[in-house]
Amino acid sequence: MKKIPCVQAATGFLLKGNPMYDVESLCREYDVDFKDMTIAGQTFRFATPQTIDRFIDLADITHDFPLWAKIWKASWLLAENVAGQPPDATQKILEIGSGIGVVGVVASRFGHDITLSEYNAHALNFAAANLCLNQCRDVKIQKLDWRHPDLKETYDWIIGSEVLYHERDLEPLLNLFRKYLKPDGHITLTMGVRKGGVIMLDRLQRHFDLTVKKYTIRSEDESTRILCCSMRPLSSINT
């Protein structure tokens, strides 16, 4: 395999003890598939795990289930949304729950200043390799635990797909938004339509001016409804 120039990781964050993690490294450590996708008129290739078996805790399959290992339709919609926004050199974007890096790769290709963040070490490896695979440069990758966030700057735009999956994550996310969203910043979250997510959106309305749009993504064998949620903080969230 031809070696592809790698992206430098964010200061203080190392992948496998090395600030670079490329496609060759990924293929040596994991069983990898490659998926081609067209997003906003451009073609991308993403490395994905062939299976999720090695990432599942057999003693408790619900513990840290590898949701990151799938390319969600909500991620595709968020990538389209970001690609459709004109890049602004003064605007810093933070993606939370970046998974294998689909949205971050697309955002970088379309000229945005984006930092990818994830907690799972395997997901971070795939995200770094996918940045290399798509020849994205000057992109930061940040390990981020929502319950104990430790970021060095604030952001104009925080984005995420399928992050409102577990109700236990709602309060940590609110705390993260309070600390790291600029007062005039905004948030975009995408998610599939499900009862638990709708309940969490209802709770978010106490803190945000919330606008929700519903989209239907159709493929050959199914249709999937996706919500795109745009939020600006009410004065209470930053007090």
Image (cartoon, rainbow, N blue to C red):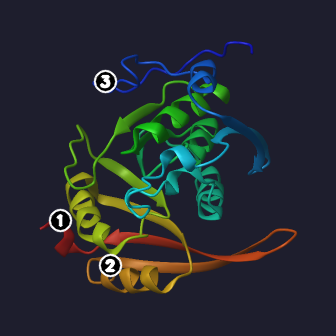
Secondary structure under the numbered disc 2 in the rendered image:
helix
Q: Secondary structure at mark 1?
A: helix
Quickly name the residue at label 2. 204
Q: Who is closer to the viewer here, 227 or 67? A: 67
Crowd band around label 1 with a 10 angstrom C-alpha radius: few (<14), some (14–19), many (20+): some
Q: Are marks 2 and 3 in contact (CB under 8 Å)?
A: no
Q: Position of residue 129 (x, y in %)?
A: 57, 29
Horizontal side of residue 229 vs 146, given as left or right:
right
Q: Is residue 89 visible?
A: no
Nearer the observer, disc 1 or disc 2?
A: 2
Say above or below: 24 vs 35. Answer: above
Q: Residue 19 vs residue 179: left or right?
A: right
Residue sitting at the far right: 220
Q: Residue furthest front?
A: 59
Q: Quadrant of residue 152?
A: top left
- Within 10 angstroms of label 2, few (less than 14), some, or many (20 or more) residues? some
The spot of residue 84 in percent (x, y) is: 65, 54
Task: Give the amino acid type for the residue marked by disc 2 in the picture.
Answer: Leu
Q: Which numbered disc, 1 or 3, marks the residue that appears first in the sequence?
A: 3
Q: In the rendered structure, find residue 238 and report the number of the disc placed on it.
A: 1
Q: Residue furthest left?
A: 239
- Closer to us: 37 or 90: 37
Residue in the image at 41% along x and 18% along y: 19
Nearer-N-terminus badge (2/3): 3
Mark earlier in primary sequence (1, 2):
2
> Which residue carries the number 3 mark?
11
Q: What separation in Å lies between label 2 and label 3 (alpha carbons)? A: 32 Å
Q: Is residue 163 visible?
A: yes
Q: In terms of image quadrants, where is residue 239?
A: bottom left
